[in-house]
Amino acid sequence: MTNENKNVPEKDKPDGSYTVFHGALVKKKVLSRRAFSFVSPGFLWSLIFLVIPCLALFAVSFASRGDYGQIEWNFSIDNMKRLAGFGYFGWSADNLLIVWRSIVVAVVTTFLCVVLSYPLAFFLVSRPDKSRTVWLTLLLIPFWTNLVIRTYAWFLALAPNMPLAKLLAEVGAIEPGTALYPSTFAVYIGMVSMFLPFVALPLYTAVEKMDWALVEAARDLYSGGWRVFRHAILPQTMPGLSVGITLTLVPAMGMFVVPDMLGGSRYMLIGNLIQQQFGTSRDWPFGAALSLVLMFLTLSALMASRRHELKKKEA
Amino acid sequence: MKVTLSALAIGSMVALSATAKEELNIYIWTEYTEPELTKAFEEMYDCKVIESNYENCEEMVAKLQAGGVSQYDMVFPSDYIVPSMIELGLLSELDHSKIPNLGNLTDTFSSPSFDEGNKYSVAYQWGTVGLIYDSEKVTEPIDSWKPILESEGGTRFALFDSEREMTGIALTYLGYSMNTTNKKELMEAANLLIKAKKKKGYSGFVANVGGFSKVQAGTLDMSFCYSGDAFANIEESPNLKYVIPKEGTVVWCDSMCITKEAPNKELAYKYINFILDAKNGAQLSNYIAFATPNKASLPMIDKALLENPSVYPDAETEEKLEFILDAGANTAMYGELWKMIKTR
C-alpha cells in the first residue's frame, strides 16, 4: 500500500470520508474504487459465463421443442411433468432410476477414492522432501493426457491378452480370453483413476499440516487404531477431506463418458440423458430442465455439507 | 495515418485477390472424401477445397445454426435430418440446370422420400446397417436378426448405440414399419430389446465402427455394423461375415447440399456435378467402400464390391430396406422409448 496520507493537503485532512486501511489513511471512495477494480474482472467473468447462462437455462427449461428441433417460446410446464415421469407411455420410474444410479456411481466412486487416498496421503507426507516432488508429479501426470485417451488406455490394459486379465483367468475368476471390460469393475477403475488426485491432493495438504502430538496423546491413552483415526486424525484432516469429497462427488454425478466407455453403455446416467437431449433428440428445453435437476442435486449436497461444517465450528 | 491505413488495406486486398484462389468450404463426415479426387477438382477449377469434419448430424446442424450457414458452402447431411434442415432454413434450393449430371442418379435416389424431386439434396453415398459375425464362433450361417435379438446360449453380442436405427431394426424384425408411431408396436420393440439385454451373452451397446472392431478383436461374436465400416476392413479377417438379414434393415443415405448463405454457390454446383460424373463417382466409392447412388458409375465399380449383395443389395433385398424419417413432433416419444430401453 502507498502511504497516501503523507502528501495530503491540510484542508483534506481527516473527516468522515477517510478511513485507515492497513495503516494508511485512505479516502473511502478511493478504497471502494480500488476494491471494485480488483473484484470486477472475476465478477464479470462469472456473470457473463456462469450466471447469465444459468438464467438462460432456467428460461429455456420452460420453453418447448418445435417439430424441427427449434426452441419455441411458449411458457409451459410440460418439461417438469416429463421430469416427474409422466410421458408418452404412461408414468414410469425411469427418471428416478437414472438419478438414483447416478448418485450411486458418484457416491461409490467418492468412497473408493477416499479409502485409497488416506494411505496415499500418509505415504506422500512420509517421503523425504527431495523424492516427494517426484511422487507428487507421478500423481499428476495422468492429467497431462485427455480423459478420453486415458479411458482408451484402460481398454488396452484390460484387454484379454494383457497380464491383468490373464492373471484373473489363471485364478479362475474370469473365463480365459475374455476382456475385463465392459463391466462395473472397469467403470470404477476408470472413475477412481480419474478422480483419485482430486481427493489425494487436498488430503495430502491436510495430512502435511497435521499435529502428530494428538496422535501420540491418543496412543498414550491406549486408544486402538480405529479410535486414533476417528478422534485424532479425522478431525484434523476434515478440511482437506471435505474439499476432496466435493471435488469428486459433484463432477462424478454428471460424468457419463467413463461409465459409457468402460461400462459398455449398459445403463443411462443423468449425464447421458442430458447429452441425449442436446444430441439425437435435439430437445434443448428438456435438456435444460434436466440440467437444472442435476444442478439442484449438487447444490443441495454442497449446502448440506457446508451447514454441517458451520455447525461443527459453532460447537 | 488514416490514409496510409486505408492505402495499406487496399494494397493488401489487391495482393490477395491476385494470388488467392477461389475457395470451397465443405463440412463433411470424417474420412469421407477421396484425396486424389479432391486434388483433381482443385486443378480442374483452379480452386482450393477446405474440408472441415463433424461426427454426427446434430453437431453439424447446431454449428450451421450458430452462424456456419454463411461460412460453409456445402454440407453432407444424412437422410432423416434433411427435412428438419429445410424447415429450419439452412439449405438452399438447388437449380437443376447447373447440375447436368443429375440424371446419373439411380431411380431410388432420383426422388428420395426425404426430399422429393431432389429440391435441396443430391445423394452422395449410401449404405445399410447389417450384422457382422465371426464365422468361426457362429458356425451356422445367419440370415435373420433372430440370433442377435433373441440370442440363445452364450453368444456374445452387443446392441447398436443409435436410437432410431436400433429401434428401427427391432421394429422391422417384428414386421412393423421402422417409422411407426403406434405406441403398442413401439412398446413391443422396446420389450424385445429389454429382453435381449437380460441375455447371458449381452455385453453392452456399441456405436459406429465399435461393433466391427470388437468382433474383429474377438471380444464379441456378433454385432451391428454399417456396411462401409465392414467392407473397408473385412479383407484383413476372412472369417468375418457381413449380412443383411432377410427381415430387412435400415438404409441410409448422405446427401450433398448447398447451405442457405453459401459464400461460393457456383463452385458448390460444380463440385456436385463433378462428383456425379460417372468416372469420379466410381473412383470415390471404390476408395471409401460405401455404395454409389450413381447409375453411370456402376460399371466402373470394383467387381468385388459390386457383386457383394451386402454392399449392393439385390432387388429382392432392396424392397425390404427402409429409410428412417424425421419423427418431427414425435421425436420426444422415440427419445423416451430409447431412455426406457437403456434404463431397464
Image (cartoon, coloured by chain):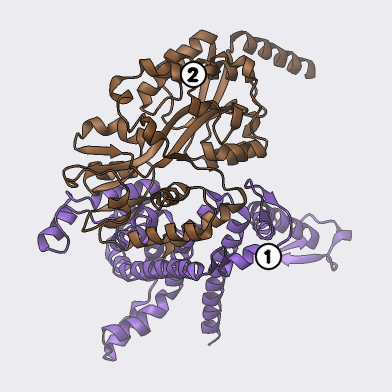
Chain colours: A purple, B brown
In the image, B73 versus A194, the foreground residue is B73
What's the amino acid at mark 1? Ile
Number of residues whose C-alpha sits closer than 10 Å to that of mark 2, classed few (under 14), some (14–19) or many (20 or more): many
Vertical arrangement, residue B208 with respect to residue B6, above or below: below
Q: Residue furthest front?
A: B316
The answer to whether B138 appears left or right of B264 in the picture is left
The answer to whether B139 appears left or right of A296 in the picture is left
What chain does badge 1 belong to? A
Q: Is residue A93 visible?
A: yes
In the image, A229 versus A255, the foreground residue is A255
> Which SS class for mark 2?
helix
Mark carried by residue B275? 2
- Same chain check for tags 1 and 2: no
Mark carried by residue A191? none
Vertical arrangement, residue B236 with respect to residue A313, above or below: above
Residue B95 picture location, percent across and down: 65, 20
Residue B111: quarter of image: top right
Residues under numbered marks 1 and 2 in contact, where contact means CB atoms less than 8 Å apart: no
Vertical arrangement, residue A235 with respect to residue B206, above or below: below
What's the amino acid at mark 2? Ile
Residue A297 picture location, percent across and down: 54, 69
Q: Residue at x 38, y 59 (%)?
A: B192
Q: Residue at x 63, y 15 (%)?
A: B97
Number of residues whose C-alpha sits closer than 10 Å to that of mark 1, classed few (under 14), some (14–19) or many (20 or more): few
Vertical arrangement, residue A227 with respect to residue A151, above or below: below
Report the quarter where the N terminus of chain A lies: bottom right
In the image, A196 versus A53, the foreground residue is A53
Q: Residue furthest right?
A: A11
Mark carried by residue A77? 1
Q: Is residue A254 visible?
A: no
Label 1, label 2: how far apart the Cα atoms are? 49 Å
